[in-house]
Image (cartoon, coloured by chain):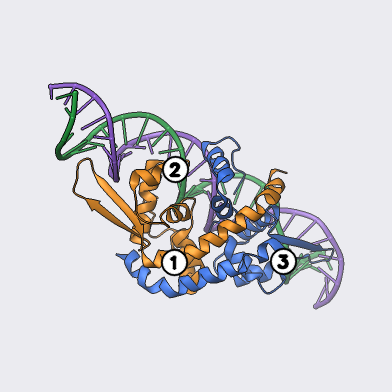
Chain colours: A orange, B blue, C green, D purple
Amino acid sequence: MGKRKENSTNMQNEKSIIEGCDLTYAVCMIGGRWKLLILCRLENGKLRFSALRDSINGITERMLTLQLRELEKEGLVKRTVYAEVPPRVDYELTDIAKELVPIWSQLSKWGAKHKKVTSQLMSV
Amino acid sequence: MGKRKENSTNMQNEKSIIEGCDLTYAVCMIGGRWKLLILCRLENGKLRFSALRDSINGITERMLTLQLRELEKEGLVKRTVYAEVPPRVDYELTDIAKELVPIWSQLSKWGAKHKKVTSQLMSV
DNA sequence: TATGGTACGCACAAATTTGTAAGTAATGGG
DNA sequence: CCCATTACTTACAAATTTGTGCGTACCATA
């Protein structure tokens, strides 16, 4: 999440796969350890940076910043800066991101339903 | 996807986050570049290794193997080996994985709908 | 005997993601 | 003047994921 190399095999691959596959595109947008987590925290409205940080267990400020930057570039969150000191910034979902609400909520339900079963399998 | 270090900060983090968060759990199960792709190829029934490989643009045999192994451990795909030569192996969704069908299909629709718009933003 | 097909495994290298531990700016309060 | 607050940056290190190229077993067929 430092910048990626434009011409790595990996990057080229990703681009050409995205061309033909909408699912891959979507996965690239919301994939990764934190993005969905962040988005779902914003489900009920604006939150400021510190509130997000505190509500997401285990995330560091660095990671939160990086992910928010990406989500912003991708058009999934809107960032608002207030000209105050100390600084105040808040984040909210865009309409595009709001369309994803049912998806993460189903995913979360699915997770809840199967967590026990499969985590036993995993520890084998 | 060589094995992960059991005691890395990263691993410990992931584990403790999963404990409290079903969404994170789900993301860990199906996250990554290929897993959803593989699952959705199996949506209409069994496929053998080579068929999967050929239907997923850009995946290498190594990656396909690794991902299938994980999906199997997680209980999302079932692997069947036939005692034949040359070898024949096929893969199919488990019931748990079948519950995810609506999720990736919605995600794919979402991707299709927004691909153009946001990929312009990304190239800026 | 040489070759071909299938589903992998392995070693190594490169790319990418994540974590850690520091700063920074601006301003209000003591 | 010193300190606290907030939302970040930056440099560096470690972990994880992905790609590349080659090798393997098996038996049927040519």
| Residue B102 in picture, x, y percent from top left | 59, 69
Which is in the foreground here, disc 2 or disc 1? 2
Residue drawn at x 58%, y 42% is B15
Q: Is the C-beta separation of discs 2 and 3 under 8 Å? A: no
- Distance from Cα at disc 2 to Cα at disc 3: 36 Å
C23 and A53: which is toward the camera: A53
Write down the residue under mark 3.
B92
D8 relative position to A71: left or right = left
B105 and A88: which is toward the camera: A88
Name the element at disc 2. Answer: loop
The label number, if any, that marks residue A15 in the structure image: 1
C5 relative position to B120: left or right = right
Instruction: Characterize the local packing of mark 2: few (<14), some (14-19) or many (20 or more) Cα atoms within 10 angstroms.
Output: some
Write down the residue under mark 2.
A59
A46 relative position to D26: left or right = left
Residue drawn at x 37%, y 62% is A74
Which is in the foreground here, disc 2 or disc 3? 2
Q: Quadrant of the C terminus of chain B?
A: bottom left
